[in-house]
Each structure stands twice: as C-alpha cells, then as structure tokens.
Amino acid sequence: MKYYSPRLALAVIFLFPLIWSGWASVRGPEGFTLANYRSITGYGEGLATYVGNSLMLSGMTVVGTLVVATLGGYAFARFHFPGKNLLFLAALAILMVPYATILIPLYVLLDHVGLQNSLLGLSLVFVMFQLPFALYMMRNSFEAIPREIEESALVDGAGSVKVLLSVLLPAVRPGLVTVGLFAFLASWNDFFAPLILLSDGASFPLPVAVVSMTQRTFGAIDYGVLQAGVMVMAVPCLVLFLVLQRYYVRGFMSGALRG
Amino acid sequence: MLRRLPALAAAALLATSMAACGSAAPEESAPGGTAAAGPTTITMWTRAATQAQSERLVEAYNKSHTNQVKLTVIPTDNYQPRIAAAAGAKQLPDVFAADVIFVPNYTSQGLFADISDRVAALPFKDSLAPSHMRLGTYEGRQYTLPHTLDLSVWFWNKDLYEKAGLDPEKGPATLKEFAEQATTVQEKLGADGKVHGTFFGGNCGGCYVFTFWPSVWAAGGTVMNAEGTESTVASSPMTDVFSIYRSLYDNGVTGPTTKEEQGPTWTGFFPKGEIGVMPMPSTTLGSMPADMKIGVAPIAGPDGGESTFVGGDSVGISATSQNVDAAWEFLAWTVSDEAQVEIMAKNKDVVARTDLADNKYSAEDPRVVLINSLVGKGQTPYALKFGETYNDPQGPWLRFAREALFGDVAKLPELNETLNQSLTQ
Amino acid sequence: MTSPLSTAPRLRRRRALAGWAYAAPTAVIVAVLFIAPLVLVVIMSLHKWPLLGQARPNFPANYTKIPDDPLFLDSVLFTLKYTVIVTILLSAVALGLALLVQDRRPGVGFFRTAFFLPGAVGFAAAALLFYGLLNNDFGPFGFLGVNWIGSPNMALTSTILLVLWRFAGFNMLILLTGLQAIPVEVYEAARADGANRWQIFTRITLPLLRPTLALMLILSITGSLLAFDQFFIFTNGGPDNSTVSMVMVVYRNAFFRFDLGGAAALSVVLLVVLVALNAVQMRILRGATTK
C-alpha cells in the first residue's frame, strides 16, 4: 500500500485533465450529448476531409523522417566523411531557431520549388523540424549495435546497403518506432505551420479546422466543441501511444538517448 | 562532387528566392484583365468571425453565376498573421476581407488593388456605408467595399428587467441610466451569483474600443484626431465614461470574470440570460435564443446622445490578383440590391447601403431598422497603426484602459503618451 | 585490433563516399529547408522589408533599435525567469517520477504510461484543454474560487502547471534510461558498505546520472527560451503583458506590426545567443560523458 498509494495519486492527477476533457465534450445541459461531436462532423468540408488531410500529412512526415533519419543516422554512426560533424551540428541547430520567424522564408522557398500550398511541402517542413531528435536517436541506436555483427556480414561480402537493410534495421526497430511515433505526434498536432503554409481551406489538417470551428460566432469560444475537438485530435495519438508503448520504451531504453 | 551538391543546391535556391523577393510587384499586379476566356474561379479569404455572412454570399453567387468563388475561412485570431505571410510570399488570394479597422494599414502596405474607377461607376456609390468607404480610401484612391457591418448597441434582457421591477419596454437613454438599470438588476436579482447587472471585456483592447468609444462620440467627444496620430483619451468625456464603468465594477455590478475577460467569451453571457444590460455586437442579434426577449438601444453618452462603432469587414481585390475583372464582378454583386436585401437583410444582418436601410425584411423587426439607422450616425476611427495600438493585447491601449478601470487614474496622462508614440512610430 | 572497415586507404575512400551518400538526404533537407531560409532571415534583418514591394538596405537600424523596445527588454527578463523556474521544477518532478517508477514491479507499467500519456496530446491541444480546464465558468475548479490567469503570478503558475503536466513524462523517460543504465552492482556495493538511501542518491545516482540530466537540461532550457505556444494560446501574454516571451515579441513584430526586418533581427540575435549557450552546455555535457 505504501508503494502504490502515492503513485496512484500522482497517476490520477496526470490522467485527470484528459478524463475531464473527454467528459466535458459529451456534457450537455440535459446530461449526455453528442451534439458537440455532431457540430464538428458537419463543419466546413466535413470532418472526414480534415482527418484525411491530417493522415496524409502525418503519413508523409513519418515516412520521410524515417527514411532521412535512418540513412543519416547510419552515416553518422558508422562512417567517417569530411563535413560530418558540421552537418550533424547544423541539424541539431534546427532546435534553436524560433519557429515563428523561419516560416515566412520557408513560405517563399516552398513557392520557388513549386510546393506552396501542398501537404507534401508542409510534410517536408515537418521532416526538417523532426531531424534533430530523429537523427540523434537513430545515430545512437546504430551506435548501440555491436560492430562485430556488421563486420562479419561485410567480410562475407555483403554491401553496406544490404547490411543496413537485412542486419541493422531489425536491430534498431525500437528506435525506428520511437522516431516514427514522435514524427506522427508532431505533424498530427501542429497548428501553426499548416495555418501559415496552406492557403486552401480544403487541405487544412485537423488542428486548424478545430480552432476555426470553435471560433464560429463573433468573439465567443464554444468550450464544449473545443473539448470535443481536443478529443478528436488526442484520441488517435493516445491509442498509438498505448499500442506502440512496448517499442518506444525499449527505444529509449536501448540507450538511444544516452550521451 | 557529392560533397558540393547541397551547397550548390542551397546557393541556387537562394539566388532564385532572393531574385523574386527583390523584384517589386508591378509586373505582377499590372495586368488588369482576365486573360483566359470562359468561367473563372477566384479565391477568397475571410475570417471565422464573419464566416456566416461570407458563406451565404458566396453560395448564392456561385449558384447564379458562371464565374465561381472559392472561399477559405481562417481562424479570426490568426487572420492577420496569415495575410502577412501570404503577402510576404506574394501568394494573396484574389479577394480578401479584413476587419475594417485594419484596412488603412493594409492599403498603406499596398496589399489591395486600386478600384477607384470601378467604384465610381456604381450607380449607388454614394450610399455605400460611409465609414467603411472612408477607411478604404488612401491618398485619394479607393481600395475596398463594405463587406459586413457589425455595430455596437446596447442589448437589454426584458425578462430580467421585469423581474427586477424595471419597465421592460424602456431601455437606457443615457450612460447614467444604463448604470442605474444595471445596478437595479444586480441588487434585485444578483443574490444567487448567477445574474449580473452588466458585463464588459476587461482584458480585451478591441472590446473596449467597440463598446466604450461610442459613449464618447455620443457626448460629442473624440478619442483621437482625424489623422489617427494623436490620442485624446486622457480627457473628458472618455474619462467620464471610464469612471462610470469603474464604479459599476467597484460595486460588483459586473460579472465576476469581467477583469480577466480576454475577448473569447465576452458575448457568451448575455444569451444565457445572465446579464441585465450590456453593449453587444449587432451581428449577434440573429443568433440569440428565439424565446429570449431582447431590447435594443443605441449606445449613449453619460447624458444622452447616440452613436455606435461601425465595425465589421471590408473586402478588396489583392494587389497580386491575376483575375481582377472576375473579382470585381463578384465584389460589385455583393453590394447589389439583390445580395444586400435577399441575403444580408433577410438574415437580419446590417445592410452595407444606407439607401436600403428600410427594406421588406427590416420592416418586420423595428430593432433591425434602428440598427440600420445607426450606420450613418456611427464612427469608425481611422489610424494607420490601429491594430498594434488598440487591438493587440501587447499594445499600449489595453494597459491604458485597465489602468483607468482597475488601477491608478493618475497614470493616464503619462500612458496617453505611449499611445501617441505607438500611433506615430 | 584491426578492423576490416579501416584497413586499405582505397576502401576508406569508398567508405567516405558511401557515408556521404547516406547523409545526402539529411544534407539536402538541412540545406534547403533550414540553412537557406536562415540565410534569408539574415538578409531580411539587414533591410527594411515591406510585405509587398522593394526591400531597402538599412543595416544596422534593425539591430540598433532592439534596445529601444521596452516590451522586448521585459520579455527577456520574463523568459529568463520562466526558463529558470521551469527547468528546476521540470527536472525535480521528472527525476521524482523516474525514481518512483524505476523498479520492476507489478503495475509499474501503468504508472509510467499514466505519467507519459499527456505527452501524446499536442501542445496546442493541451493549451486549449487547460484553457477550458482552468476556466472558472466551464472547468471543474470553479468552486475553488482561484483566479487562474487573473494575476501575473497566477498566470505564470498556471502555465507552469500546463508545461509540467505535458512534459514531465517525456523527461521522466529520458531520466529513466539513465537510471536503468546504472549497473545494479554499484548499488549493491554501496549498500554493502552501509550507505543509506540518501547517500546512495547523492553519491551514486546523481553523479552517474549527470550526462542524462545534462541532456534533459539542454532540451528544457532551449525549449523554454523559445517558449511560444503556451503563452500565445493560454495567457495571450496577459494579464498586463506580464507573460510575454521573447518569441512572442518576434511574432508580434513580424505578423502584427509587419516589421519583417526588425523581427528577423531579433531572431538572429536569439539564434546567436542560443547557439552560444548550447555550445557551452554541449561542452559541459561532453565533459560529463567522458569518464
């Protein structure tokens, strides 16, 4: 009891806001109601469009982040090449830039490569913002694999691509899941970048749509709808989080975040 | 070779992006006509706050015209950043609406295309909402048309008035009567903490402007000079208006969250039947609960008079639009008799033309006639730096107003200087 | 020990080329989407940069006017204060949670999940959630009569509660990896020498946890100095400008005052300070890792 009671109390404190939000989203003047969810479903282009946009956006971001960070992490963990440290530090420096200011130049830039107002262009921006965490994580995941495994495969005549795909990838799976999960969370939830970089209401992802729909009438926030929106955004993340828990806990534990 | 690639790519990209940024807009904005024949689809942006009106207009237009309008609604609080980013990248839509108060700043930044000649050709040009038209004029040229009108008026709850022993058919005619009636409601019905005499957005610069300033104008006073470069709020009658509201707050007549209200919910208490009398936006009249009996009165000064803040949105063609003719066709239609009467007036919205103030729909509701009649009497202050001075929560006005209501009145002359600085920088 | 990876020089050159090939996607993304916009920010900071139309060079005006902005100076002090408080509290709470759930016991997985779960909610969504939660008319705490964002101190306190709720679990997980890496034998040896729990914590756990703690500190300090969402959505800088962070001033200058050049100059200054700060921290971190 002495072990469990303080932990249980803390768990309740941490879970309470989520539970309250779920409850508030179905609370009406006369008890239980789905009115808030109904009003979300019918908004603008329809909820399905926004969920679809968010899924596309997050899907591309996850795939892009995984590809770039796996290749990059492998390069930084196992190869020596000129400019290696500089590139790594430059990637880490992404963490240090105020998000709000780099958006206008990014807008200009995406325009010039023909990716303005597109989910693809936006997902590339998310991949960039994910790089510091993803590269760091993948580099350390690769470094944690004993070199002998790789070397014996190389001696057997396999090329580095084959070694990466068949030997190393399975070994860094927890790291991959962790990186993918965080890329998903970031791109699924981000509000500001899509708001600035997308100009077509039909391609808005969920967070922009939710904030728009809660500001429907002049200067009045509809709190019930707001909490329903929070739930629609949060539930997929919570589910993924729970399903993938086994992996990302191991991803962190496998030394991926050390040093 | 491989090593140089990223550097080269970056250099090339930069070169193109800088070339584009350095070049001025003229060659892009010059073509006035629609190049392609056949139906054109133009893009339009509006803010969520006036979404309903824009959507109704666009829907009706698309049904009856070959040209089509594609409307994008953007969250109100983020509308200005969105416009700024799009303008910075020269990606503005063909048509965009904007809070009328920001229009002088936008036109001075060159965001709208000059439509003076097209406006001059409209047969009803002299009856377009005068304050919206004045704010859309920059250096003698016309850039915008009125899109939606949102006026501040006093709403009173007739049921609460009756319960409090007041005459439910007689609203306040002066700010002093307003305060007396609010106090009566508070004293008679406020015991359970649910009902309050009045309410205002105490931490919301735009709310103060919208709800307090008409009392100043009604008393014959000013809040700034005509050029919008000098603030006059540290003197009477503004100070008198502040002190009446201040005593309402001090006496507990205002709702409990008055001081903290940042704006998101300031209109939310009245429809719940919790407020006796308060200034409200006229656009909310159509969305009030059907069974609620609401009286509407013009905002008055301490001893009488009447005025209003003529807010709402103006709409213009962006300086970078390639579809100016198609865009104008839509804009001109939105202020036509058909659109104004059958769409705006039918939904109890204020019409954008003074010559249509009395129409077949407004006749059904005398409150709408009253609101329409105020369009010509009200004001919309003109200042290039309006937004950052008065609306921005980090601007100097909010600090000033909060000091006047909750703080030290002796600081006001000094704070008025910060207003002047912000207006002229 | 000779490794087949580093013998022949020809092979080494081939390895270097392969390394570059693998790093190429990273390099392209960093160059195109980060370095290039950054260079544009620097160029903007040297100009009076209007929304539409011709930019005019005005160096160093955008930089020299920075000290004239009282809002920015206040925001520097506020952001520093916020960073110190959040970093201390976040480290303490995260370390406490990590210590609570470090042992393998039945149910420990549930506790870890519970503490970590708020991290799955987007920060914007979390801020909106708290906006409702701490609203006395709508939220569950109205009966307390506490005015959550009414005074400067309460607004800061509420924001810190939000940040702790959202990020404590993530930082707990980072620290947990460090805790798990400490060999059990070290603890056993200490216990055999008669050390009590406090001595074990201060003389073994803390020193061996230093690299992990340092990493957490870097993330927390950098994140706090760039704080934006929490204040923008939750307190809106209020009341009375008491919670305006540095990035909010940058945002205001760029998007509300349309002073793109001035905002760019502020960003450049911020970036330089952060890079310098992190270089120092990195050095300390590296010093801590090499035993």
Image (cartoon, rainbow, N blue to C red):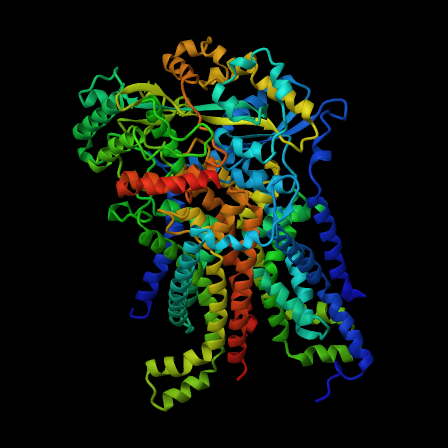
User: C180 or C223, which is in the foreground?
Assistant: C223
Answer whether residue A229 is visible to the viewer in this image.
Answer: yes
Picture quarter with the N terminus of chain A: bottom left
Q: Quadrant of residue C25?
A: bottom right
Instruction: Note whether B212 is above or below B16 in the view shown.
Output: above
Residue at (71% x, 59% y) in the render: C28
Answer whether residue B298 is visible to the viewer in this image.
Answer: no
- Where does the image place residue A190, in percent across and percent down from the top left? 54, 49
Residue at (24% x, 30% y) in the render: B197
Picture quarter with the C terminus of chain A: bottom right
Left/right placement of residue A142 relative to residue A233 reads right
- Where does the image place residue C255, in percent across and percent down from the top left? 53, 43
Left/right placement of residue A60 relative to residue B292 reads right
Left/right placement of residue A172 relative to residue B251 reads right
Instruction: Note whether B356 is above or below B250 in the view shown.
Output: above
User: A33 or B237, which is in the foreground?
Assistant: B237
- Where does the image place residue C278, in percent across and percent down from the top left? 53, 68
Residue at (41% x, 46% y) in the render: C236
Left/right placement of residue B37 relative to residue C211 reads right
Q: Quadrant of residue B35?
A: top right
Judged from this view, the residue extending furthest toward the bottom is C193
- Where does the image place residue A247, in percent across and percent down from the top left? 55, 65
